[in-house]
Amino acid sequence: MGTIIYPEKLNVGDTIATTAVSMTANLDKIDIAIENLKELGLKVIETDNVRKSEGAVSSSGKQRAYELLELYKNADVKYIIASRGGEFLMEMLPYLDEHRDVIKNNPKWIQGFSDPSLLNLYITTNFNIATIHMENISEFAMNPRYKNIQDNIDFMFSKENEFIQESFPKYQKQEFEEGNLKGYNLTEENAYECDKSNVSFEGRIIGGCIDTFHLIAGTKMDNVSNFVSQFDEGVIWYLDNCELNSCEFYRRLWQMEQMRYFKNVKGFLIGRSMMQNNDNNIYFTFKDAVERALSKFGVPIVYNVDIGHIPPQMCIINGSYATFEYKDGKGKLTQKLI
């Protein structure tokens, strides 16, 4: 029977940190985001690479790993937020893996999504430490603050072990504009989809941006199959598709099945896809990809969930005990830190 380690929540006066585990921070937003976090009563530090750039990354994989490890060693730092997404986070993982004891012996919250999903997956599945799939630091610059960001902040400070979120009424048609400080442009009516009008399932929740998962599959850093096997209660998988067309999406799902990632699965949550309206393959749609890969498991599949690059998105605690309830196009996610 597996157990999950939940780091300590924040108190006013605590120190949090941001580091560029992939690309350089959004320089139009980073200062505003930091000021907004300071207004919550937090001290905020940043690593050297947050404002540096070496092409498509902030710094070398080794340097990014070093700066993250230093934050884990720093006892004053209680919470780490990725500065931004990007493309090549995987370069830092071998260096982190050389210093596994640093992460294992200093558990603390780490938050991010998109490319940082791979870091979350690595930490939670290798060390049984909960991680947070949610916006990178730039979106804390938003004013006015949307409910999902406030939910995230409430979670940071809450001493409760239960965290409840419900589907949002509307969503933005495209990915969030990185230079937009005023918030989301919520024009589309939100409606989750499922082949049942009413369904509920529960288990340990794990997932993130599927674009990144194949990068560790089968390597020494891949412990996903062992992780999901620990939990008799089963697992809920949530998946955010950023840039994959329908055929490549299916290939990634097929690979995950072959790697036995879907053992003990109790349900799937499929986020809104950035590519769903840009895929010209009329013979094989995104829904075709999901059905072909996942219907064989005989568990509920819920589509268009508030997860991923098309905002707003829920805050997902990897490793938490989750219950998902779907009814007539709406959803409710309850996560317990047990």
Image (cartoon, helix red, strand yellow):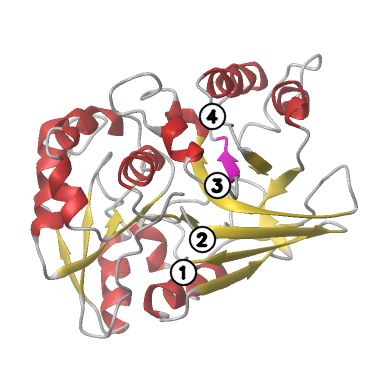
Could you say which disc has been placed on residue 243 in the image? 4
Relative image position of residue 249 (x, y in whole percent): 61, 23
- Dominant secondary structure of the magenta stretch? strand
- Reading the image, the residue beneath label 1 is 152
Could you say which disc has been placed on residue 315 in the image? 2
Residue type indicated by callout 2: Cys
Q: If you read the primary sequence from the N terminus, does the residue marked by circle 4 or circle 3 appear first?
A: 4
- Reading the image, the residue beneath label 3 is 308
What is the C-alpha distance between the residues marked 3 and 1? Answer: 15 Å
Relative image position of residue 284 (x, y in whole percent): 77, 17
Q: Which residues are magenta?
A: 235-241
> Quick check: marks 2 and 3 in contact, CB under 8 Å?
no
Image quarter of residue 256: top right
Judge whether residue 60 can be spotted in this image.
no
**In front: mark 1 or mark 4?**
1
Q: Residues within 10 Å of mark 1 (few under 14, many from 20)?
A: some
> Quick check: marks 1 and 4 in contact, CB under 8 Å?
no
